[in-house]
Image (cartoon, rainbow, N blue to C red):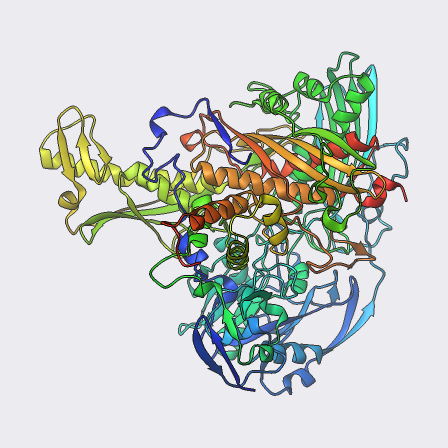
């Protein structure tokens, strides 16, 4: 089948998509956007979290055809090529990136959390990110990164594109 | 709460960096920006025009003879380029890290569920999977051996007071899974009085379930056939050169025709030390003449790598009435599963360090590794020390209770220190602050009691499932301390190779560090840069891609890379620095004793000399390549276990605070605190990251992580059913990092990664015991162990 959707603001057309393919597979293998990760491919780990029409979803659980005509946002679209989004910068500064395989999904989930809630409490952050597994960090530095990003994004001068 | 404190106590003063990304700084990882932009190329991200997808057909049976394999229907599937079986392996048909006993593709017998039988390459992964399902394998199913002691013909224990009579003759009646029998290794430690007596004796039997590394990036890589008849393999792994050696053997190709490059690694934790898809992808690429990508899904990943050995252990501790340990006897059984992998070395660790960081005059340990038809077990973070720590720390708590002593006091009273002898007769010749680690934990404030004021469900066991508002919830506090060898042991020639180049690029002095040491997420690439910055006084350091065009760096395991590859990089930098300083002296025409490299220049403080490297080097390139070794260890005596087995020990301790819903058996870990001596924190932020991550994996084993096996079959190969801690399961942590320099190690550093993975779980178990009053001798602790239902 042919799939047409908008990814990170750019309209994409892909031919010869097999109906059984997931949005994650199409992003990674057909559109050259492997940033969204394939850690479990069963909706348990959150590594493939992308925006679908503005809502975070596990791209592995979305059939490619379900994205037809819709807006998809991935980690590659969080910032323009010349800069980092404050959430990305905060993950680096806090040391929240080790192997980094969970990072793209966590960045999208954190971006969504801060966009919705501004400065979430730790308890709110834990609830919001409970669907994103990380095996390296024990999550402490991820919490540090969320606090840091939320603080920076709340400061008008250090704002960045919310 | 999460801000760690550091206690610099002995690290060389001059290494306290000025914040310029040298040794001792929180330098940022060079791969960080790529990782947060989604541009870092992991093994599963690799892609080439015209590439094929490879998949593996695996045995559904834990033990069976193969009567025949019919691949015709698979080959006839449109889109399929190749179907391979064991007949297509051109070289040695078996491989292994320590013993070559594991078939590349099943020969006449499969010995575990998930053993690879055949391979398919096709133009789409689903086509390849469909074709694999059309391969007909005729199995003669056999009765699997699924218990280590049964495999060895040893009697099973039923209760604590059974006889521990040593079994000297292995039963020849139990099924032999391998020609040499089912014993992989039996390690004996014998020291002191063989028949000691003591005032107080406690006996316990303990069991540790099978843990999975559960790295998030699946086994994956891309094999590309080369014009010279060889193959280029881009793969996520822990040790390129040991892979290369095994691949060469299977492919019957020389090393120069099997070239490996490290792909991005999404975590490892030991699970990538053995081969997975490496040879398979190369076989398919060489057969089809096209690039072949293989990437396991999560279910296949559970079958595609070794796991942590499950263990059953029986311990007897004898002490004086005032709490001095007199003797420890232990029998430790590791279930190695179907193939040896690194079981011999795991047994080595389990046996030599099996009584914990305590001074005990009389020790009698038997540690066994056995073949069974369970999944193969091998390396996982903590490597043979995690299992025994649950047992020996549980024993220390039981002994403290029997003596009416405080558990921390009992531990401190018997703690190893510098100058102590281990049960293997090795005198500890660097700091061993075991008691201090515990005392510092004890001095930390405890978290507020739960249920004060309004109940927040999110703080309760069961969380927002609304299972309790505090009724039936009891708090417990537990302590544990552990130690672990750093680097490879027992006489292994453990070395690393580093090539360091210094040149001027675009007017800026630039160092390039080239090693084959696998970066798996821990931050070795950062450490390599930091060392080069400090040693060469330059800011710009490029880390060359990791590949086999430079000599072996050894494995990224055993907490060894910062020590060994760090040592190699330091030594190579020193060689380059000698060349630079000699050149500077030639330039100034005399010997200047205090010449050094700093800020991109050669400088002397006494003579007011500053020669920029850009001027000194011009277009010249200075380079040094060398192999570096830590001081040698030695094989242990096969009858007594005595010998200088380990080059260095890492020490850590944990305090766990838990709330347990005793009615439902649910556990909420409220806080973890950790103290660890790291000798010298090369990158403090990364050190703390290792402690936090290791703590999480230990907590996971204590309360939730287990591969469930029934009759040799894995029942939970998914992240739906194999649980690892989420951000809701992990509590805040208090961390104190101590820096007592080890005079034998580069910069005084001590390997970091594994120790905190060892002491955290036993502390959680102790805290649950303290909350419930139950003996709890098995991990992971399940709700029914607490409720008794």
Residue at 14 percent of width and 37 percent of height: B611
Give the quarter of the image for residue B109: bottom right
Residue at 44 percent of width and 29 percent of height: B748
Residue B291: give x, y in percent of width and height. 48, 74
Give the quarter of the image for residue B385: top right
Nearest the viewer among B769 and A10 is: A10
Which residue is most to the left? B589
Q: Is residue A99 left or right of residue B374?
A: left
Name the image quarter holding the N terminus of chain B: top right
Residue B246: give x, y in percent of width and height. 55, 58
Nearest the viewer among B26 and B558 is: B26
Q: Is residue B770 left or right of residue B45?
A: right
Q: Is residue B185 visible?
A: no
Q: Is residue B655 left or right of residue B557?
A: right
Residue at 11 percent of width and 29 percent of height: B590
Is residue B712 placed above or below B767 in the rendered structure? below
Q: How many marks?
A: 0
Nearest the viewer among A5 and B624 is: A5
Which residue is most to the top? B322
């Amino acid at each position: 089948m042919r799939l047409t959707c908008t990814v990170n603001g750019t309209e994409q057309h892909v031919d010869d998509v097999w109906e059984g393919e997931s949005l994650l597979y199409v992003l990674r293998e057909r559109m050259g956007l492997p940033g969204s990760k394939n850690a479990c491919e069963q909706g348990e780990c959150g590594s493939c979290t992308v925006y679908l029409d503005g809502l975070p979803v596990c791209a592995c659980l979305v059939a490619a055809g379900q994205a037809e005509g819709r807006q998809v946002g991935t980690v590659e679209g969080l910032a323009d090529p010349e800069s980092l989004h404050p959430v990305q910068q905060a993950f680096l500064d806090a040391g929240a990136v080790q192997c980094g395989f969970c990072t793209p999904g966590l960045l999208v989930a954190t971006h969504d959390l801060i966009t919705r809630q501004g400065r979430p409490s730790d308890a709110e952050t834990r609830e919001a990110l409970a669907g994103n597994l990380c095996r390296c960090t024990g999550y402490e530095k991820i919490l540090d990164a969320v606090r840091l990003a939320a603080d920076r994004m709340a400061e008008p001068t250090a704002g960045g594109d919310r | 709460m999460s801000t760690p404190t550091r206690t610099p106590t002995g690290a060389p003063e001059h290494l306290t960096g000025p914040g310029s990304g040298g040794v001792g700084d929180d330098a940022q990882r060079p791969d960080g920006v790529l990782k947060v932009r989604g541009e870092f190329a992991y093994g599963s991200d690799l892609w080439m025009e015209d590439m094929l997808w490879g998949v593996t057909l695996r045995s559904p049976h834990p033990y069976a003879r193969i009567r025949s394999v019919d691949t015709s229907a698979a080959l006839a599937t449109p889109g399929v380029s190749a179907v391979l079986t064991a007949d297509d392996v051109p070289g040695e048909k078996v491989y292994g890290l320590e013993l070559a006993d594991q078939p590349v593709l099943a020969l006449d017998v499969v010995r575990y569920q998930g053993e690879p039988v055949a391979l398919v390459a096709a133009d789409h992964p689903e086509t390849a999977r469909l074709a694999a399902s059309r391969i007909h394998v005729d199995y003669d199913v056999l009765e699997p051996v699924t218990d280590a002691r049964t495999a060895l013909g040893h009697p099973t224990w039923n209760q604590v007071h059974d006889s521990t009579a040593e079994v000297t003759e292995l039963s020849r009646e139990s099924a032999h899974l391998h020609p040499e029998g089912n014993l992989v290794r039996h390690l004996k430690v014998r020291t002191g009085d063989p028949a000691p007596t003591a005032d107080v004796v406690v006996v316990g039997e303990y069991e540790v379930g099978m843990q999975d590394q559960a790295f998030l990036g699946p086994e994956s890589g891309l094999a590309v056939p080369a014009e010279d008849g060889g193959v280029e393999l881009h793969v996520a792994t822990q040790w390129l050169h040991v892979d290369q050696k095994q691949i060469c053997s299977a492919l019957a190709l020389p090393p120069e025709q099997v070239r490996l490059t490290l792909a991005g690694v999404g975590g490892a934790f030991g699970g990538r030390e053995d081969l997975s898809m490496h040879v398979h992808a190369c076989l398919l690429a060489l057969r089809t003449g096209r690039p072949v990508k293989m990437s396991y899904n999560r279910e296949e990943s559970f079958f595609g790598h070794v796991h942590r050995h499950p263990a059953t252990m029986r311990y007897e501790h004898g002490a004086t009435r005032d709490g001095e340990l007199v003797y420890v006897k232990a029998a430790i059984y590791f279930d190695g599963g179907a193939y040896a992998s690194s079981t011999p070395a795991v047994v080595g660790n389990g046996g030599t360090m099996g009584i914990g960081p305590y001074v005990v005059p009389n020790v009698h340990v038997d540690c066994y590794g056995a073949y069974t038809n369970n999944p193969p077990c091998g390396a996982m973070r903590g490597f043979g020390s995690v299992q025994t720590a649950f047992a020996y720390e549980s024993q220390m708590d039981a002994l403290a209770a029997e003596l009416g002593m405080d558990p921390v006091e009992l531990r401190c009273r018997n703690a190893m220190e510098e100058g102590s002898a281990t049960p293997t007769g090795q005198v500890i010749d660097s700091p061993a602050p075991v008691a201090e680690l515990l005392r510092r934990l004890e001095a930390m404030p405890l978290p507020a009691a739960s249920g004060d004021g309004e109940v927040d469900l999110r703080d309760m066991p069961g969380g927002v499932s609304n299972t309790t508002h505090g009724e039936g919830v009891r708090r417990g506090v537990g302590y544990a301390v552990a130690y672990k060898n750093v680097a490879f042991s027992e006489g292994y020639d453990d070395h690393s190779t580093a090539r360091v180049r210094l040149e001027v690029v675009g007017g800026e002095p630039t160092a390039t560090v080239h090693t084959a040491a696998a970066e798996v997420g821990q931050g070795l690439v950062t450490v390599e840069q930091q060392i080069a910055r400090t040693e060469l006084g330059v800011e710009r350091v490029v880390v060359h891609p990791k590949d086999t065009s430079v000599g072996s760096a050894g494995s990224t395991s055993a907490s060894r890379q910062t020590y060994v590859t760090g040592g190699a990089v330091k030594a190579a930098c020193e060689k380059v620095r000698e060349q630079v300083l000699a050149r500077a002296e030639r330039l100034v025409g005399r010997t200047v004793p205090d010449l050094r490299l700093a800020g991109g220049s050669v400088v002397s403080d006494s003579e007011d000399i500053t020669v920029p490297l850009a001027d000194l080097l011009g277009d010249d390139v200075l380079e040094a390549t060398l192999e570096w070794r830590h001081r040698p260890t030695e094989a242990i005596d096969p009858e007594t276990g005595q010998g200088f087995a380990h080059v260095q020990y890492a020490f850590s301790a944990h305090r766990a605070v838990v709330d347990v819903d005793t009615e439902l058996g649910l556990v909420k870990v409220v806080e973890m605190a950790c103290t660890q001596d790291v000798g010298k924190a090369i990158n403090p932020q990364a050190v703390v990251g290792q402690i936090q991550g290791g703590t999480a994996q230990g907590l996971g084993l204590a309360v939730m992580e287990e591969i469930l096996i029934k009759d040799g079959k894995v029942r939970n190969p998914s992240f739906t059913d194999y649980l690892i801690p989420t951000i809701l399961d992990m509590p805040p942590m208090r961390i104190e990092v101590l820096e007592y320099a080890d005079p034998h190690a580069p910069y005084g550093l001590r390997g970091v990664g594994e120790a905190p993975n060892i002491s955290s779980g036993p502390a959680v178990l102790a805290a649950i015991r303290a909350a419930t009053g139950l003996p709890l001798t098995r991990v992971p602790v399940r709700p029914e162990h607490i409720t008794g239902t």
